[in-house]
Image (cartoon, rainbow, N blue to C red):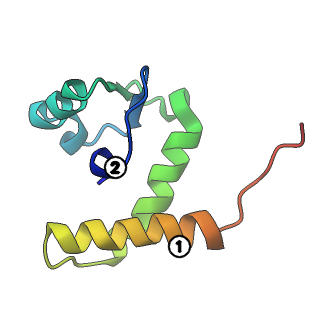
Amino acid sequence: MALRTRKVRTGLIHHSDRGVQYAAHDYVDILRDHGIRPSMSRPGVPTDNASCERFIGTLKRGEIYLKDYDDFDDAERSIDRFIDVVYNHKRLHSVSAD
């Protein structure tokens, strides 16, 4: 979805957990074909990118583990809605004071 709706900026890094779906050659090839550098935490060290790991955990607990999707399109719509509506607008996020 993101690759269809957004421009990829130079230097973009895609950080994910160590799930097999993110390490799959086809997935990594798609990222690289779009100039995106894949990134994963080292095994057993989730603090390598704690904010990303936190978001992924929230997405799984708040959406993915709670749903049975009809198909890929259903999953894409539902996850997109969760991120746009629930995560970005309803959940409280800390804001750093500069």
Q: Residue at x 29, y 23 (%)?
A: 35
Residue sitting farthest toward the right: 98
Numbered tag placed on residue 69 in the rendering: none
Q: Residue at x 89, y 42 (%)?
A: 97
Residues packed near mark 1 inside 10 Å, few (<14), some (14 to 19) or many (20 plus): few
Give the residue type at disc 1: Val
Could you say where residue 41 lies in the image, as x and y percent from the top left? 42, 28
Q: Please, is residue 24 above or below residue 42 in the view? A: below
Q: Please, is residue 73 above or below residue 53 in the view? A: below
Residue sitting farthest toward the left: 26
- Report whether 48 appears left or right of 43: right
Quickly name the residue at label 1.
85
Residue 16, picture quadrant: top left
Q: How far is disc 1 from disc 2 in space, using C-alphas?
A: 16 Å
- Report whether 59 appears left or right of 5: right
Q: How many marks?
A: 2
Give the residue type at disc 2: Ala
State the quadrant of the C terminus: top right
Q: Residue at x 57, y 37 (%)?
A: 50
Could you say where residue 79 lies in the image, as x and y percent from the top left? 36, 67
Secondary structure under badge 1? Answer: helix
Q: Please, is residue 68 above or below residue 5 in the view? A: below
Task: Tell which circle, 1 or 2, labels the residue nearer the N-terminal end.
Answer: 2
Residue 18, picture quadrant: top left
Secondary structure under badge 2? Answer: helix
State the quadrant of the N terminus: bottom left
Could you say where residue 95 lies in the image, as x and y percent from the top left? 79, 50
Quickly name the residue at label 2.
2
Q: Residue at x 58, y 41 (%)?
A: 51
- Report whether 28 appears left or right of 58: left
- Report whether 64 appears left or right of 50: left
